[in-house]
Image (spheres, rainbow, N blue to C red):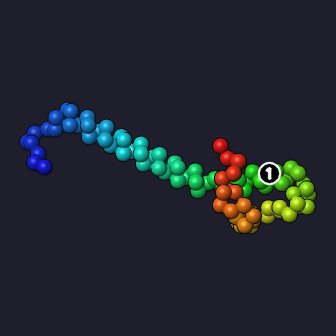
Amino acid sequence: GARLPGPPLPVVALVRERGERFNTACAGAVSGIACAFAVAPLDVVKARKQVQNARGGAMQAAGQHYGGTLASLRLILRQEGVAGFYRGLP
């Protein structure tokens, strides 16, 4: 639209600033959710490897040996599907 000459009105500046804050908050929320979805499978692998180390050979006898990170991701995907990556997380 047409702009009035002179400095912007204080109300217009305040509304614009609040809009920018809202956009920034929404962008932060979306990026936080995306990060949580990306990192959760790695947290599951880490936790299962820690349990495996604590239990020793009991998990290997049950057929659940978690080797490297990629092998562990494949094992969880093959045995439990995608839901296995998010099981047990808060």
> Which residue has dot 1 on it?
50
**Which residue is at 88% across, 51% downward?**
55
Q: Is residue 23 above or below residue 81?
A: above
The quarter holding residue 5 reads top left
**Residue 69 visible within the image:** no
Q: Is residue 78 above or below residue 57?
A: below
Rendering coords of residue 79 (x, y %): 75, 64
Q: Is residue 46 above or below residue 73?
A: above
Task: Return the residue nearer the eye: 14 or 75.
Answer: 75
Q: Is residue 32 left or right of residue 57?
A: left
Rendering coords of residue 53 (x, y %): 85, 53
Q: Which kind of residue does numbered mark 1 sit on?
A: Gln
Q: Residues within 10 Å of mark 1 (few under 14, many from 20)?
A: few
The quarter holding residue 16 reads top left
Rendering coords of residue 29 (x, y %): 47, 46
Q: Is residue 84 left or right of residue 21?
A: right
**Which residue is at 52% across, 48% downward?**
32
Furthest residue to the top? Answer: 10
